[in-house]
Image: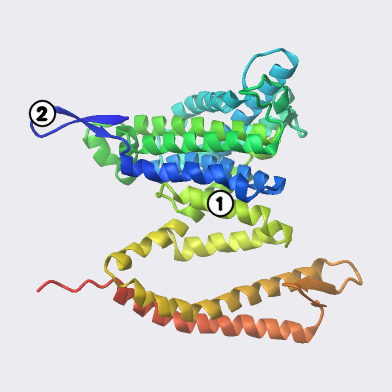
Amino acid sequence: MSVVKQDSAGSRIANPLITVSQFAPWFVVIVFLSLLPVIFTSGAALTIMNQMAITIIFALAYNMLLGQGGMLSFGHAVYMGLGGFFCVHLMNMIEYDGLWLPLPLLPFFGGLFGLVFALIIGTFSTRRAGTVFAMISLGVGELIAASSIIVVVFFGGEEGISGDRTMGPETFGLDFASQLEVYYLTAFWLVISALAMYLFSRTPVGRMANAVRDNEERAEFLGYSQRNVRFISFCASGFFAGIAGGIFAINFEILTEENLNLATSGSILLITFLGGVGFFVGPIIGAIVFTFLQTVLSLYTEIWQLYLGTLFLLTVMFFPFGLTGLIAMHMRPYQLGKISLLVKPYLRMAIPGIVCVLSFSSLLEIAFHAKHAAIGEEHMSLFGFGFNSYNILLWLVVLVLSIGSGWLCKRLAVGVREAWDEANFVEPRS
């Protein structure tokens, strides 16, 4: 694929959307996704990887709005949820009405359904950006979430709508009854969707979305309609969000009001910020970290959401460009050949930092257990150690470790900051 441009002489030249060197990482990703089920063979691992893939597609679709177009949406789960509900209805039509439709095509129709609603809502929501767009998206999200309880014939009320993915015609001899078959179908749509969104970001419309995000007036002065650019990006984002909803329907075979409410929209906002707004790989990293914490950390603690919220808060406060931005910050010291200056300060900070995190989390776990445990259930286990959560001496030890390690981290942060400034310093040319 290529974009046609004109050189200084006026002749038309083709500028490729993606070069061979840029395609190499995609090839690595395809091989990596193909080998993952060989490494992680359990059904639980496949379920987690499928959930990660769905979240990645949804987060990338959301980043088309926020990261590329500068449109903050509080109701983008609507398009994912609508696409998922439509696909579940298609499953039921395949099973009960004899509709002939191969299961691998369902996400595409889910994307089309999300696109239809994005076209309708985008006609009035993309007229303005900023607070106006955010409030409209919030209102639309609440409206659709409320309608999911009222319009029972489509949304199924509080129970939702369920289907059976195995009732459709076989595709290449596959009936998608096993989780492994569903994984490869999910991975296929992940690669196709991510590549399509990457190529969209390199088109003139995708580039102009960045321009409109940075300076609306200048984009208008150059002859581009900021509303049209936002509208196209909004519709494309709704399409890929619908694809994510379709894959969700295939994986879990049930859709409820939870899939399109404000909590889901807030989660995808958190994921995008956590990974890094503005970076294409940012939502991917955010989705992987969020899904891992949600599925794995929740097995060990009931207050995992508190840790996730704390991580999000610290990211916004100290690393506003997310985890991807934190990694990208180290490219300059690496290019200057001064990355080694940061190794020793980082190692000094590592031990007290780990102690601070563990002691603070221990304090929260002990307090939660002491407050919510049943009467007489004073014993608890944490990090492989059993103890009495009402032991005052234990409380004092953990509290001292939290405060002491936090104070030490603050002292060592001065040295880290000095090393950082030195690693980024460029000597002036004589």
The amino acid marked with disc number 1 is Ile
Q: Is residue 195 left or right of residue 307?
A: left
| Along the line of sight, the residue nearer the viewer: 346 or 266 | 346
Cβ atoms under marks 1 and 2 closer than 8 Å: no
Q: Which residue is mark 1?
A: 288
| Along the line of sight, the residue nearer the viewer: 162 or 306 | 162
Above-or-below relation of 266 to 384: above
Determine the secondary structure under disc 2: loop
Q: Is residue 356 left or right of residue 323?
A: right
Q: x, y percentage for residue 288? A: 56, 51
The amino acid marked with disc number 2 is Gly
Determine the secondary structure under disc 1: helix
Q: Which mark is residue 275?
A: none
Where's the C terminus, which quadrant?
bottom left
Q: Which mark is residue 10?
A: 2
Q: Is residue 213 left or right of residue 243?
A: left
Q: x, y percentage for residue 399? A: 67, 82
Q: Residue at x 24, y 41 (%)?
A: 218
